[in-house]
Amino acid sequence: MNKGNFMFNKEALFEMYRPKTEEIDIDGFNGLFVKQLSEREISQIRKDSGLSSEKKEGDQSNDLFGTKMIVTSIVDSDGSRVFCDGDIDRMRDCANTLIHNLTQRVLKLNGFINDEKNI
């Protein structure tokens, strides 16, 4: 195989894989962004949510995972979190349909949902 003048640039790869943000409009509230989370952040959310491979009756860890994804992913134009962990209970008391729609947007940008199926 002819490798030619190709030289792998590790720094360019890390820059390309840096988490990105996408501006969203949440029910008329502009200026909010969804941030892609890092592997480290998602691992911590999984751990904090108590996700395990064994699902037990009454287990709400998936619901908590989605809510924690929202709280961690929604940022302002400076990249600062809009919500804090203290907002989780308040968010879980919000209308399910609205939170579900927001969760779907966050999960899609973070690679858990594509147009064909849940991953």
Image (cartoon, helix red, strand yellow):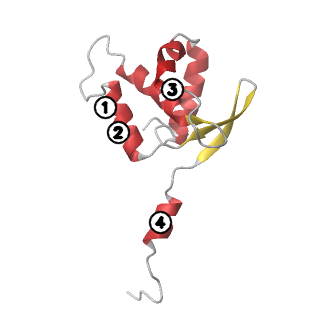
Q: Secondary structure at mark 3?
A: loop
Instruction: Give me the disc on residue 84.
Output: 3
Tell me whether circle 2 and circle 1 mark residues in contact (CB < 8 Å): yes
Is label 2 or label 3 in front?
3
Residue furthest to the left in view is: 54
Please say if 93 is above or below 13.
above
State the separation of the CA atoms marked 2 and 1.
6 Å
Instruction: Give me the disc on residue 43.
Output: 2
> Which quarter of the rendering shows the N terminus?
bottom left
Tell me whether circle 3 and circle 4 mark residues in contact (CB < 8 Å): no
Residue type marked 2: Ser
State the separation of the CA atoms marked 3 and 1.
17 Å
Is label 3 or label 1 in front?
3
Query: In the rendered image, which residue does mark 4 sit on?
Result: 13
Residue type marked 3: Cys
Q: Quadrant of residue 65?
A: top left
| Percent coordinates x, y for residue 97 in the rendering | 59, 16
Please say if 59 is above or below 76.
above
Please state if 28 lies on the left or on the right of 96 as rendered: right
Q: Secondary structure at mark 2?
A: helix
Q: Secondary structure at mark 4?
A: helix
Tell me whether circle 3 and circle 1 mark residues in contact (CB < 8 Å): no
Please state if 11 lies on the left or on the right of 40 as rendered: right
| Mark before the other along the chain sequence, 4 or 1 | 4
| Mark before the other along the chain sequence, 2 or 3 | 2
Between 9 and 118, the one lying in front of the other is 9
Instruction: Give me the disc on residue 47.
Output: 1
